[in-house]
Amino acid sequence: MNDYNPKDPKTYAAGTFRKTLLDLPKMSGADFFKYWGLADTTIEFVGHALALYRDESFMDGPASDLVEKIQLYATSLMRFANMTSPYIYPLYGLGELPQAFARLAAVHGGLYMLNHEGHLHDVEVVYEGGVAVGVSAEGVTARAKMVIGDPSYFPDKVQKTGQVVRAIAIMAHPIAGSNDSGSCQIIFPQGAIKRKNDIYMFCISGGHKVAPTDGKYICFASTTVEGKTDGLTAQKIAERELAAALPLIHPALEIFYDIYDEFDPVDDGTANKLFISKTYDATSHFETAITDVLDIYRRIMGKELVLTSGPKRE
């Protein structure tokens, strides 16, 4: 798997002695699994927990896409010495990521409008000739070649695609069945829990500088809402939608429940230079968020972002 190269058919070899070449681009995922004789439960695990698909599209899509996603999981697991997980998490929480971006942006001339305490929707996009040329807040305008933002800033330029429900728990114990791990991620494949959508569970602790070191843990469980929500509290919705995951949290010191709408932009933004991201979905591994960022880059630059070490600069 690790030496698989999508551009080199010679690496499509399968089996212990690697004598059989599989035509991965033309073979479906279903045929790929059939070749290996995998059980349905194993197929579901590979598709959802390793390749991180959110649905069963991997069964009909080309096996080459499936293998690339599994390869990403494997190479991520070996990215650093002594890793026991393909996932990395910043110390002091995800807030460190925007901080890192802010510092890097400042080095490259980024401008910040600080101490603007107005409501979110008090920020207005400035247009000239139907093209976004900046943003204005409390009488101050920052001009730019384009405007990029999340759906919450542009309610009239996005469409609702669904809802996400979350349970956030503070616990005095690790997740049951996790070998007392200080951090872990659990994906409940939809078929195994009789749902249309997976459930995602994520736990971190004091080792990540996000909780006290005296045995406290922070756990998140989330999924896409499938049932009706009218007249129900976020807790009632979570107890219905996250029923398979909540027993692993209890007993919890405190649980907070949240439900929010998901939005997608109604257009790609290339015409008016207003580029809108998607709302964070129910996943906890950020694979879809990264995909969205790459898509925004493509829309802005007109080409794919290629992340390589590249040649040395003079």
Image (cartoon, rainbow, N blue to C red):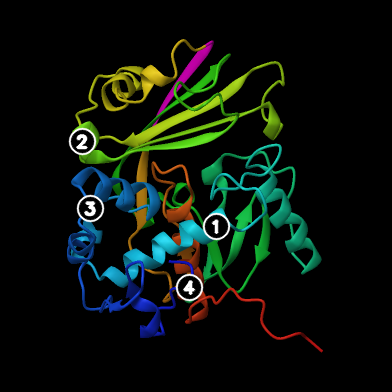
| Circle 3 or circle 2, nearest the eye | 3
Q: Which mark is residue 38?
A: 3
Label 2 packing within 10 angstroms: few (<14), some (14-19), many (20+): some
| Circle 1 or circle 2, nearest the eye | 1
At x 76% / y 85%, what residue is drawn?
312
Q: Tell me: 28 left or right of 156.
A: left
* Three-letter code, disc 3: Leu
Label 1 packing within 10 angstroms: few (<14), some (14-19), many (20+): some
Does the magenta run of residues contain 229? no
Earlier along the polypeptide chain: callout 3 or callout 4? Answer: 4
Earlier along the polypeptide chain: callout 4 or callout 2? Answer: 4
Q: What residue does disc 1 label?
A: 76
Q: Tell me: 152 left or right of 99.
A: left
The magenta span reads 253-259
Assign a secondary structure to mark 1.
helix
* Three-letter code, disc 2: Arg
Does the magenta run of residues contain 257? yes
- Is the C-beta separation of discs 3 and 4 under 8 Å? no
- Is the C-beta separation of discs 1 and 4 under 8 Å? no
- Is the C-beta separation of discs 3 and 2 under 8 Å? no
- State the separation of the CA atoms marked 3 and 4: 22 Å
Picture quadrant of residue 95? top right
